[in-house]
Amino acid sequence: MAEDFNAEQRRYLEGFASGISAVRLTGGLAAGGAASAPPAEPTGPDAIHIKAQDKTVKDGGKLCDQEKWKRAESPFEGHNRLIAEAATGKPPKPEDNFRWRYHGLFWVAPNQTSYMCRLRIPNGILHHWQFAGIADLADAHGGAYSHVTTRANLQVREIAPEHGQPFLDGLTDLGLTARGSGADNIRNVTGSPTAGIDAQELLDTRPLARAWHNWIINDRSLYGLPRKFNVAFDGGGVMPVLEETNDIGFQAIEVLEGASVAPGIWMRLVLGGISGHRDLARDTGVVLRPEDCNAVADAIIRVFIENGDRTNRAKSRMKYVLDAWGFDTYLAAVEEKLGRKLDRVDPAHVAPRKPTDRFSHVGVHAQVQPGLNWVGVVLPVGKMTTDQMRALAKISAECGDGQIRLTVWQNFIFSGVPDARVAEVEARVLALGLSVKAAGIRSGLVACTGARGCKFAASDTKGHAMIIADHVERTVTELDVPVNVHLTGCHHSCAQHYIGDIGLIGAKVVVSEEGDTVEGYDIVVGGGFAETPKIGTEIWKAVKAEDCPGRVEALLRAYLARRSGPDESFQAFTSRIGAEALRDAAEEQPALKAAA
């Protein structure tokens, strides 16, 4: 068509087209030919995020891809398109993979050409029929197994694209959801696994976890944060929930007479935990009534939404706003949102936290209810087959109170087991190839998904964890106390390797001048949590995976040879002699000297 016009006509048409483009960009022309008014103020549930993005660009920043994807099409408004495309068996584009995560589905190619679904289970508690129902859904739509995560949650893998939405629909039928369990959203809310059954606890976290879960689910403006966000509630019981590894931790405390607030049970606010970035949540000095947790958490998150980094994914967690501003400035912004000052209490007026039991999540423990017990089951790196799940659900229904309580240690507990049924539970669990014994290394073994199912992982963490456990059980038969060994595949530290007695983080180890690599790990020791929170210290770098079982063996042998007695934990021992001295002692062990 262009050849039908002369040069002057073509120039006119090009100018007209440019003018139309300019009008579109500026929002049209006002009456009388004047330029249009500035774009209207954003409204609706995404307005707070759009304003934050606009401010980033105005200040000279460049939005990262994920922020552009959110703006181009809301994961919620685009859901029907996502369903239609997935129904054809079509793998998602990167931007649609990101959008699916708002609904709980993660495309994990190239490691597995399928979706993984991560659920939302507030406080980690399921009814036996929900637990069995998830197993049925996994059989119908995915692989015949599931994994317990370090957020007291469940993941189901090997879900084909056309089975993604039917799996999510099945969750709805069970009274469950996966909404917001991935991407830049508030993840599964954790609470004390023994809430309501622990004689030591100060407060039952179940109502708080449910209330926060419902608060999130029903407020779309709390989706699409600068990055993921974790919230945990600890009731002060014997089983820690690792709230110090969360962005927001609420800790039940007893405030004593003489404080600036009335004595009684309050929640202490700790902020900024992100163990993969070598930081644990710190006490803010703020205390609040349990019923105020939701409003305060909401305000904290909205300050983060408005000020978090939307350009650099490596620096986009709340910790980095806290680092830049300081806690006082951040809390002042929170108080401005709330329209009131927060209460603060001097630590001298807070009763000390009662000791936790590092392995109360395994074995038989008396409940506060007379004659009843909880029974913790060891799961090999968190994995269960669907047949095991259905059998475990049946045990819960027949021998307990019908609940399955998941823990942040990648295992679960039966609750409400009468004294007379404990032996039966132990026998039936053993018959399934599982154990309830808190001993050795297996009961404290934690591993993320690893290279078998995660593109970020540098090593096969779950496979290597089992090899390490087999080796230690064969070679260190005198190990008479549980030891936490955490293996994580990458810097995201989903297995929280920095707080384990021994932590391993995946690394590619160069083995030739040509740059060939094999799977391996950097190794840290001395991490801790609850009353002894600590980020572990790195002692070895780039250890080949095949050499890691020997390194763990040597560390354990050094510990057993030099500890002050059987009551000295591995962490206490490491703290007493120092990480470097432990490394040197391990390197003197025969196995490592021979390898050297």
Image (tube, rainbow, N blue to C red):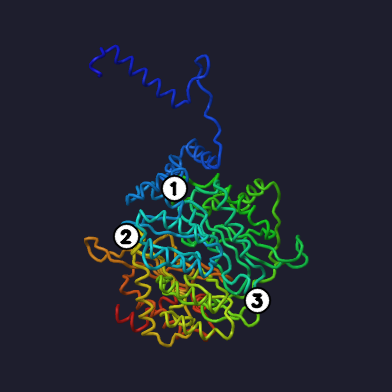
Residue pointed to by mark 2: 111
Whole-percent x, y for residue 462 in the image: 37, 70
Name the residue located 66 percent from the left edge and 68 percent from the top edge: 203
Label 2 close to label 3 by CB (< 8 Å): no
Residue 465, picture quadrant = bottom left
Q: Amino acid at mark 3?
A: Ala
| Residue at 36% over, 85% down | 475
Q: CA distance from mark 3 to mark 1?
A: 45 Å
Q: Which SS class for mark 3? A: loop
Q: Mark 2 or 3 closer to N-term? A: 2
What crowding class fits label 2: few (fewer than 14 Cα within 10 Å), some (14-19), or many (20 or more)?
some
The percent position of residue 189, horizontal first and vertical second, equals 55, 60
Q: Give the residue pinned by disc 3.
A: 199
- Which mark lies nearer to you, 3 or 1? 3
17 and 317: which is toward the camera:
17
Residue under circle 1? 312
Q: Amino acid at mark 1?
A: Asn
Q: Secondary structure at mark 2?
A: loop
**Which corner quadrant holds the C terminus?**
bottom left
Q: At label 2, which amino acid type do we have?
A: Asn
Query: How far apart are the alpha carbons under marks 2 and 1?
Result: 25 Å
In this view of the protein, which residue sits in the foreground, 548 or 488?
488
Image quadrant in which the N terminus is located: top left
Q: Residues within 10 Å of mark 3 (few under 14, many from 20)?
A: some
- The location of residue 154, given as percent across then percent down, is 46, 64
Q: Residues within 10 Å of mark 1 (few under 14, many from 20)?
A: some
Side (left or right) of 580 relative to 261: left
Q: How far apart are the two marked residues, 2 and 3, measured between alpha carbons?
A: 45 Å
- Image coords of residue 449 (percent x, y): 39, 65
